[in-house]
Amino acid sequence: MITIKTSHGNINIELFDEKAPISCENFRQYAKDGHFSDTIFHRVMPNFMIQGGGMDQKMSPKPTRDAIKNEADNGETNVRGTLAMARTGAVDSATSQFFINLRDNDFLNHGDRDFGYAVFGQVTDGMDVVDAIAAVETAKQSGHSDVPVEPVTILEVTIDE
């Protein structure tokens, strides 16, 4: 089991190793390296998703490893409670940032509008925490929209497998 320990509570997740081996290994390595500690959920959009894993409380990006191959064509879909790799407009640009879907976001799936966003896991316990994070007040900060006014911190990500 993997636990995302946040300032709002714990989120337990299961990774889809068979469907998204590159994304899962990437996430595990960032967790083992302690990369996620003291990052924030820097983008919170109710009825859409919460995104984190790459910025500190000053909205400064943490250094990352090289981008990985996009596995959005793995058959998994962006439904409520799934985790997917965040990326730029470039298909193979995901590094450490991920998001948790707050609803079924079919338009993020492979082929619906572009290559899509790779789903690599799902929340198994703690959707109440995810929903609480989704309900926080947000504002514009450092040129970014939808930033929680009070930081929602990822304290650490632990792996018990």
Image (cartoon, rainbow, N blue to C red):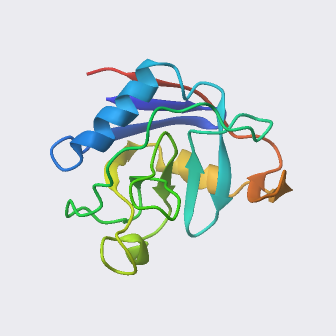
Question: Which quadrant is the C terminus positioned in?
Answer: top left
Instruction: Please report the residue visible at 54 percent of the width from the left and 25 percent of the height from the top.
Output: 35
Extreme residue toward the bottom, this view: 113
Expressed as whole percent of the image width and height from the top left, the position of residue 21 reads: 22, 41
Residue 145 appears left or right of 74: right
Q: Nearer the viewer, residue 132 or 22?
A: 22
Residue 30 appears left or right of 69: right
Q: Nearer the viewer, residue 156 or 66?
A: 66
Say which quarter of the image contains residue 46.
bottom right
Say which quarter of the image contains residue 24.
top left
Instruction: Please report the residue visible at 66 percent of the width from the left and 27 percent of the height from the top.
Output: 38
Residue 119 appears left or right of 37: left
Say which quarter of the image contains residue 92.
bottom left
Question: Which quadrant is the N terminus positioned in?
Answer: top left
Whether residue 144 is situated above or below residue 95 in the rendered picture: below
Expressed as whole percent of the image width and height from the top left, the position of residue 61 reads: 67, 38
Q: Nearer the viewer, residue 45 or 61?
A: 61
Expressed as whole percent of the image width and height from the top left, the position of residue 49 reads: 55, 61
Instruction: Please report the residue visible at 75 percent of the width from the left and 53 percent of the height from the top.
Output: 147
Instruction: Please report the residue visible at 55 percent of the width from the left and 50 percent of the height from the top.
Output: 130
